[in-house]
């Protein structure tokens, strides 16, 4: 791949995950679950800034019930 991605955002698992994958050289984000139904106990989302190709100011936000 000439320009491999540096960011992978997944979902559906309802599991909060923010991890840099050294093997693939990319940041993997799964924001968790923001919905009211499901097995998760805490509703979460992830907010971050992309500034000139750099990921920064990453926040995990827990939503009130």
Image (spheres, rainbow, N blue to C red):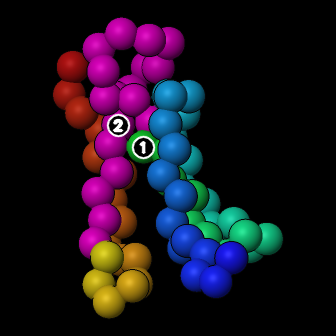
Inter-mark Cα distance, 1 to 2 = 6 Å
Residue at 29% across / 84% down in the picture? 51
Q: Is 34 situated left or right of 13 in this image?
A: left
Q: Are marks 1 and 2 in contact (CB under 8 Å)?
A: yes
**Residue placed most toward the observer, 9 or 43:** 9
Where does the N terminus fall, quadrant-wise?
bottom right
The local secondary structure at tag 1 comes to strand
**Residue 61: where, in percent of width, then height?**
29, 46
The quarter of the picture where residue 49 lies is: bottom left
Give coordinates of residue 30: x percent, y percent: 50, 45
Foreground mark, 1 or 2, reads: 1
Is 7 situated left or right of 45 in this image? right
Q: Which residues are magenta?
A: 32-49
Most distant residue in the bottom direction: 52
Count of picture labels: 2
Would you name the residue on which mark 2 appears?
44
Q: For mark 2, does the 10 Å Cα neighbourhood hold few (<14), some (14 to 19), or many (20 or more) residues?
A: many
Q: Nearer the viewer, residue 11 or 15?
A: 11
Mark 1 residue crowding within 10 angstroms, few (<14) / some (14–19) / many (20+): many
In magenta stretch: residue 33: yes
Q: Position of residue 29 (x, y in %)?
A: 50, 53
- Residue 6 in the image: above or below residue 36: below
Q: Locate the C terminus by quadrant.
A: top left
Image position, residue 7 (x, y; %): 51, 66
Picture layout, residue 4 above or below residue 34: below
Residue 54's place in the image compared with 14, above or below, is: below
**Of residues 18 and 65, which is closer to you in this image?**
18
| Residue at point 42%, 43% (across, down) | 31
Q: Find the residue positioned furthest to the front.
A: 2
Residue 31's tag is 1
Q: Residue at x 31, y 29 (%)?
A: 34
Tag 2's secondary structure?
strand
């Amino acid at each position: 791949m000439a320009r491999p991605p540096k960011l992978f955002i997944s979902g559906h698992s309802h599991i909060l995950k923010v991890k840099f994958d050294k093997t693939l050289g990319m940041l993997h984000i799964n924001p968790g679950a923001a919905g009211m139904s499901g097995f998760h106990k805490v509703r979460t989302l992830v907010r971050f800034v992309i500034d000139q190709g750099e990921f920064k100011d990453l926040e995990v936000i827990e939503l009130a019930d």
